[in-house]
Image (cartoon, coloured by chain):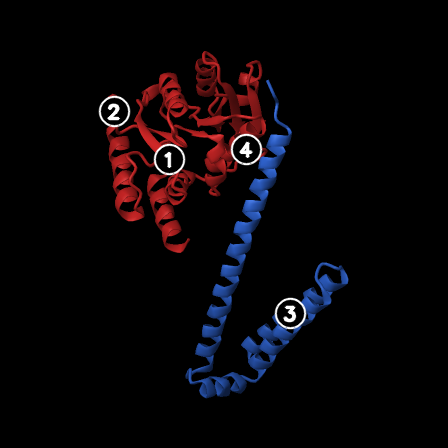
């Protein structure tokens, strides 16, 4: 096992531990905890057995396994940014609506 | 015609006080909407016979005008005017616009700084406003002589068709779009704006606004 693999595995163990802690503290749902753990365990398996991603890359025609990971990571990151942006706009609008309603309710009349 | 004048303000302090003193010489109802000022605005104007509304956080000029406009409608206003707090607009122009709306079959009357040669624009302002005008006419497709004017008067009956959503400075362009889209009857009247050095303040981010307008046009 390489040093890189050891670091990755330690980091994944830490993230999985934090996810379980958050679930125990009722900060996240059981499904989010399972999803999050599965995602990181899957990354751990890929780190331990890189041949998996190499073969997958060859099947989908990307070439190198690292390239496939980068493409997938970029797609996921852009999608998350888009989702966050839409959500943030909605929250901003909701906040402004609430502030406006409070101002009208608490108006000081002459 | 029962007219409410909406004055949006953000950290204008003494400039707002002077503007209110001028506005009080008229018989219009004055609604000051404070967009979360952190200066002494509230204490400076608390003794005046006006309506005072305050946003707890800064929301932008579009949202501030909307708050005042909605409030005026609830108070039974027949006409609503938007008037800047910083002393740039003249009372005589406001009265002229309101009378013109009252005497004509119009939904909205807009003040225009470019229809009168009386305004002495600082060079920088003149260049920026003319670029904004060219941009608005040719890129956005709105043929108004002064697309960024903050002085406007409209009938409350037209408000349902003037339901702007933008909280920031883009509400100006949005209102013009709504006028065209809803076929509202409008007219532009010349106004003179005081660009006195004593009331000079931070220049609005026009370039950023231009990009925002373009982005809005492309993706909405």
Labelled pair 2, 4 in contact (Cβ < 8 Å)? no
Disc 2 chain ID: B
Can you tell which of label 3 and label 2 is closer to the viewer? Answer: 2
Q: Considering only vertical position in the picture, is B3 above or below B216?
A: above
Q: Residues within 10 Å of mark 2 (few under 14, many from 20)?
A: few
Q: Which residue is mark 2?
A: B116
Can you tell which of label 4 and label 1 is closer to the viewer? Answer: 1
Q: Considering only vertical position in the picture, is B133 above or below A35?
A: above
Q: Considering only vertical position in the picture, is A102 above or below B42?
A: below
Q: Distance between the Cα atoms at labels 3 and 4?
A: 46 Å
Labelled pair 3, 4 in contact (Cβ < 8 Å)? no
Which is more toward the observer, B105 or B89?
A: B105
Disc 1 chain ID: B
Q: Which residue is mark 1?
A: B185
Disc 4 chain ID: B
Q: Can marks 3 and 4 be said to lie on one chain?
A: no
Q: Earlier in the sequence, mark 2 or mark 4?
A: 4
């Amino acid at each position: 096992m390489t040093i890189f693999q050891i670091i990755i595995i330690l980091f994944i163990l830490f993230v999985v531990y934090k996810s379980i802690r958050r679930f125990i503290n009722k900060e996240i749902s059981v499904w989010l905890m399972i999803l999050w753990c599965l995602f990181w365990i899957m990354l751990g398996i890929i780190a331990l057995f890189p041949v998996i991603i190499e073969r997958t890359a060859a099947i989908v025609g990307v070439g190198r396994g690292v390239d496939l990971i980068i493409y997938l990571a970029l797609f996921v990151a852009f999608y998350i940014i888009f989702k966050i942006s839409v959500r943030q706009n909605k929250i901003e609008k909701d906040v402004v609506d609430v502030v406006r309603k409070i101002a009208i309710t608490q108006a000081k009349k002459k | 015609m029962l007219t409410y004048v909406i004055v949006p303000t953000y950290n204008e302090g003494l400039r707002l006080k002077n503007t209110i003193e001028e506005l009080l010489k008229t018989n219009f109802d004055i609604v000051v909407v404070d967009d979360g000022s952190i200066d002494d605005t509230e204490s400076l104007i608390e003794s005046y016979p006006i309506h005072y509304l305050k946003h707890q956080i800064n929301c932008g000029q579009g949202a501030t005008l909307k708050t005042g406009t909605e409030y005026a409608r609830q108070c039974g206003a027949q006409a609503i005017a938007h008037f800047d707090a910083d002393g740039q607009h003249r009372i005589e122009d406001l009265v002229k616009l309101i009378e013109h709306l009252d005497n004509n079959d119009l939904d909205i009357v807009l003040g225009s700084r470019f229809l009168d040669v009386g305004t002495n624009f600082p060079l920088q302002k003149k260049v920026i406003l003319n670029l904004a005008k060219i941009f608005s006419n040719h890129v956005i497709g709105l043929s108004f002589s002064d697309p960024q004017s903050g002085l406007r008067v409209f009938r409350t009956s037209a408000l349902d068709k003037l339901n702007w959503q933008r909280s920031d400075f883009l509400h100006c362009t949005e209102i013009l779009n709504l006028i065209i889209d809803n076929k509202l009857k409008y007219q532009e009247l010349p106004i003179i704006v005081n660009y006195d050095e004593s009331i000079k303040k931070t220049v609005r981010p026009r370039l950023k606004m231009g990009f925002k307008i373009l982005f809005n046009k492309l993706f909405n």
